[in-house]
Image (spheres, rainbow, N blue to C red):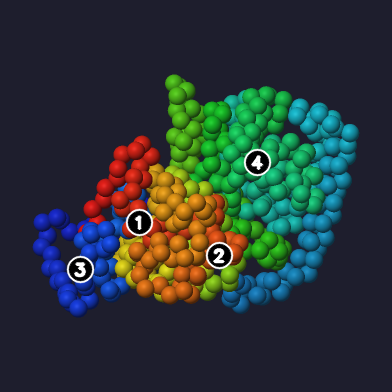
């Protein structure tokens, strides 16, 4: 079982020599053979149920077909006690309500005193790039005591610890799993480290001031230059013994503690020894994880518990191998394996990008049977398809416009409606290209992989530019509605004026009846599957970058 993951089948496939019975039922009236305008013999199916015979509509780009990894049902962001259920929980909340008011007052008073102490410690300090002077650090002890009072107010009356923090000169970097907003509060009290946090945290009331006193390293996860600067700062502060140790949550977001998601590499690129720390929240009735649950609701549930359990375990220090040539990726894998082993949880390829997708889907208040259908394990997607989380979210926007059902499935007619396509052989082939399971519907993961597969073809941009030039008439530098209709008419015949105008409007951002080259290319980047409808006018064109003619036989 150790070598299996969540996507491994419970039953092994039969041996290759195992006899199979295959029944093929074909209705001659549902298919027809014909020659297209270029004289190429093609075989079309007029039934969506027969799309397993379809050709690859993107073969002219050099595509050899689409492969979509099996999806996992794991949901690392799900809070398992999102709703209050059971007489015991309601009774406990009723009893704890008066106590919750006292805890709320303690929380507010501790936060206010800690904030004022921090303001005093920061008063007049201008050299923020140098280590904080010792006398200012002594004032910060007031804030650290206040954070322990805050933990007490949230019901963490005692915290079980196992192991001890290693000396800073041995392990200047600490990494931890991230389950709740409680861990940063605990580490502030326990270690008073320098942390790496999102730039958005600086604007938070009270909290922003306090983390500035920790000489926080800000990072914008969507900016390559910001991430590079953050790594440089981690290296600079970890190498200077006068700075506190550096604390990172390499998962980049909170999970429910039942899985360990992929690690960002920022903590591992500098190459310093790292001490992994494991945080657990044992519970029966109340899941304390900051999953897909509001902060106000989570705080209310914490205030109305008799006691909240928390365990912290300091693991053995993980260092680079002696030859110092270990990659940051391998270094992070060894560290994450140590944490996953201590937690006894499964490692997945989910990342913060999956949470972005989940939150985007939840904004529409969709009644989802399984929210995990909109998560694609973005860490592996980035590696395979080389697309960013923001690009994946853009594709999800398009997919959600297709009115997916509660299982996250999009049907053929909704797919055509959003892409402004008419039911025809090309439309069926585009849909069948993504429907790798051949069940007449597509999932978001299939749509994402299909769209990214096309847009990342080396010949895609060249094909888009040639498609534009084929649509342009005369000396014009734009595509008219008439020329646009004539060009796509090779792939989608018998289009009426309204159907041409509908598809044309998808390309025409100004709605002036003229499509500029910029609008044309932008639309195809956002809707890469539409390049297939221009393939008939590109089949005899040289679309290769190096001048070699690309010849594809379409049967």
Sequence-first disc among 4 and 1: 4
- Please give the residue where the numbered disc 3 appears in the rendered image: 33
User: Picture coordinates of residue 259 (x, y %)?
Assistant: 49, 53
Sequence-first disc among 3 and 4: 3
- Please give the residue where the numbered disc 2 appears in the rendered image: 513
User: Picture coordinates of residue 108 (x, y %)?
Assistant: 82, 57
Residue at 68% x, 40% y is 218
Q: Are marks 4 and 2 in contact (CB under 8 Å)?
A: no
- Please give the residue where the numbered disc 1 appears in the rendered image: 537
Number of residues whose C-alpha sits closer than 10 Å to that of mark 4, classed few (under 14), some (14–19) or many (20 or more): many
Q: CA distance from mark 3 to mark 2?
A: 36 Å
Judge whether residue 362 can be spotted in this image. yes
Q: Is residue 327 above or below residue 52?
A: above
Q: SS class of the residue under badge 2? A: loop
- Please give the residue where the numbered disc 4 appears in the rendered image: 219
Judge whether residue 190 can be spotted in this image. no
Sequence-first disc among 2 and 1: 2
Nearest the viewer among 64 and 273 is: 64
């Amino acid at each position: 079982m150790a070598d299996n993951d969540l996507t491994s089948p419970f039953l092994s496939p039969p041996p290759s020599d195992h006899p199979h019975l295959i029944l093929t039922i074909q209705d001659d009236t549902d298919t027809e053979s014909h020659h297209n305008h270029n004289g190429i013999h093609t075989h079309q199916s007029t039934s969506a149920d027969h799309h397993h015979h379809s050709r690859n509509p993107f073969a002219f780009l050099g595509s050899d077909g689409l492969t979509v990894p099996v999806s996992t049902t794991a949901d690392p962001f799900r809070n398992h006690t999102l709703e209050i259920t059971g007489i015991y929980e309601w009774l406990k909340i009723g009893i704890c309500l008066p106590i919750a008011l006292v805890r709320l007052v303690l929380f507010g008073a501790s936060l206010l005193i800690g904030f004022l102490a921090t303001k005093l410690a920061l008063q007049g300090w201008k050299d923020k790039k140098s280590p904080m002077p010792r006398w200012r650090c002594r004032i910060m002890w007031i804030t650290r005591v206040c954070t322990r009072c805050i933990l007490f107010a949230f019901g963490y009356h005692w915290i079980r610890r196992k192991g001890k923090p290693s000396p800073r000169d041995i392990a200047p970097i600490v990494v931890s799993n991230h389950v709740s907003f409680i861990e940063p509060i605990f580490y502030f009290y326990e270690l008073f480290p320098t942390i790496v946090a999102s730039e958005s945290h600086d604007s938070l009331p009270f909290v922003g001031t306090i983390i500035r006193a920790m000489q926080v390293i800000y990072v914008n996860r969507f900016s390559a230059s910001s991430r590079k600067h953050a790594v440089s700062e981690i290296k600079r502060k970890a190498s200077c013994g006068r700075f506190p140790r550096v604390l990172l949550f390499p998962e980049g977001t909170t999970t429910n503690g039942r899985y360990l998601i992929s690690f960002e590499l920022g903590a591992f690129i500098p190459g310093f020894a790292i001490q992994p720390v494991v945080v657990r929240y044992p519970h029966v009735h109340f899941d304390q994880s900051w999953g897909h649950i509001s902060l106000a609701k989570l705080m209310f549930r914490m205030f109305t518990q008799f006691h909240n359990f928390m365990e912290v375990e300091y693991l053995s220090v993980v260092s680079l191998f002696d030859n110092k040539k270990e990659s940051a990726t391998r270094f992070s894998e060894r560290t994450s394996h140590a944490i996953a082993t201590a937690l006894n949880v499964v490692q997945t390829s989910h990342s913060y990008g999956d949470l972005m997708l989940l939150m985007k889907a939840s904004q529409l208040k969709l009644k989802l049977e399984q929210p995990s259908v909109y998560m694609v394990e973005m860490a592996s997607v980035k590696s395979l398809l080389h697309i960013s989380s923001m690009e994946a979210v853009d594709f999800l926007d398009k997919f959600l416009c297709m009115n997916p059902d509660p299982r996250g499935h999009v049907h053929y007619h909704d797919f055509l409606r959003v892409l402004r396509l008419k039911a025809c052989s090309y439309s069926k082939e585009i849909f069948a290209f993504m429907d790798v399971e051949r069940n007449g519907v597509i999932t978001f993961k299939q749509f994402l992989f299909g769209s990214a597969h096309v847009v990342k073809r080396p010949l895609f941009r060249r094909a888009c530019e040639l498609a534009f030039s084929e649509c342009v008439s005369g000396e014009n530098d734009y595509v008219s509605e008439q020329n646009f209709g004539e060009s796509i008419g090779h792939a989608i015949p018998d289009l009426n004026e309204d159907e041409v105008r509908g598809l044309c409007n998808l390309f025409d951002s100004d709605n002036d009846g003229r499509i500029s080259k910029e609008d044309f290319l932008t639309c195809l980047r956002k809707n890469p599957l539409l390049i297939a409808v221009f393939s008939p006018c590109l089949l005899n064109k040289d679309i290769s970058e190096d001048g070699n003619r690309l010849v594809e036989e379409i049967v």
